[in-house]
Amino acid sequence: MFLKIEDIGPGGLEVREPVAAGVLASWLGEDGIYRVEGDGTVELRADCVGRDILVKGRLAAPLTAECSRCLKEIELYADVAFTVLFAERSAFEPVREETGDDGGQQFFSGPVIELEDTLRDELVLSLPMVPRCSEDCRGLCPLCGVNLNEGACGCAAVETPMAAALRVNKRKSSS
Ligand SMILES: [Zn+2]
Ligand SMILES: [Zn+2]
């Protein structure tokens, strides 16, 4: 996705465009954690700030993933807000060291700004490395594989040696 500098007038430029599911999938990687369920959308506004271009917008994408604990399929509608200042850099200027990964500033030269890398990074960085269906997902029982969010299994009654030792100690101290 490109922004033409000449299209950004004194009143700024507003853009709303679909992002094809195939493009989203290529950003997230073939066998990544996340699957793309349809086209996404990008909505943004670009304004000239001196010779720089300030781009503010949102990227939305329908995704699914497997909960890392209970393996249930979860829907994750990604909705990422981003703000990036593109500073003009002429082709003859030496490449400045880009400042770490604060992501707030990037460079462009020539008549267009290429947004694809920016959008991809914003999306990828917004997604949790380890998706979960909920903060307190109980996961699967390691013994019988039952989804513990749906109820306890019989295995909980089986005492581990550690639990047994604690119980004995407790009885000793209370008598
Ligand atoms: Zn889960
Ligand atoms: Zn169990």
Image (cartoon, rainbow, N blue to C red):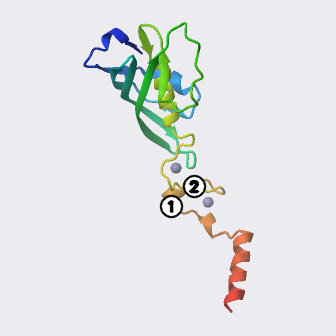
Instruction: Please tell me in which quarter of the rendered image ligand 2 is found.
Output: bottom right
- The residue lying toward the viewer, choosing from 116 and 132, is 116
Q: Is residue 104 visible?
A: yes
Decide: is 161 above or below 106. below
User: Which residue extends farthest bottom?
Assistant: 175
**Amino acid of disc 1:** Gly
Neighbour class for label 1 at 10 Å: few (<14), some, many (≥20)?
few
Whether disc 2's CB lies below 8 Å from ligand 2 is answered yes
Query: In the rendered image, which residue does mark 2 sit on?
Result: 146
Query: In the rendered image, which residue does mark 1 sit on?
Result: 151
Mark 1: which secondary structure? loop
Q: What residue lies at 65% left-to-right and 55% top-to-bottom?
A: 142
Q: What residue lies at 69% left-to-right and 86% top-to-bottom?
A: 171
Neighbour class for label 2 at 10 Å: few (<14), some, many (≥20)?
some
Q: Position of residue 108 (x, y in %)?
A: 47, 15
Q: Position of residue 47 (x, y in %)?
A: 33, 21
Dot 1 and dot 2 residues touching (CB under 8 Å): yes
Image quadrant in which you'd find residue 111: top left
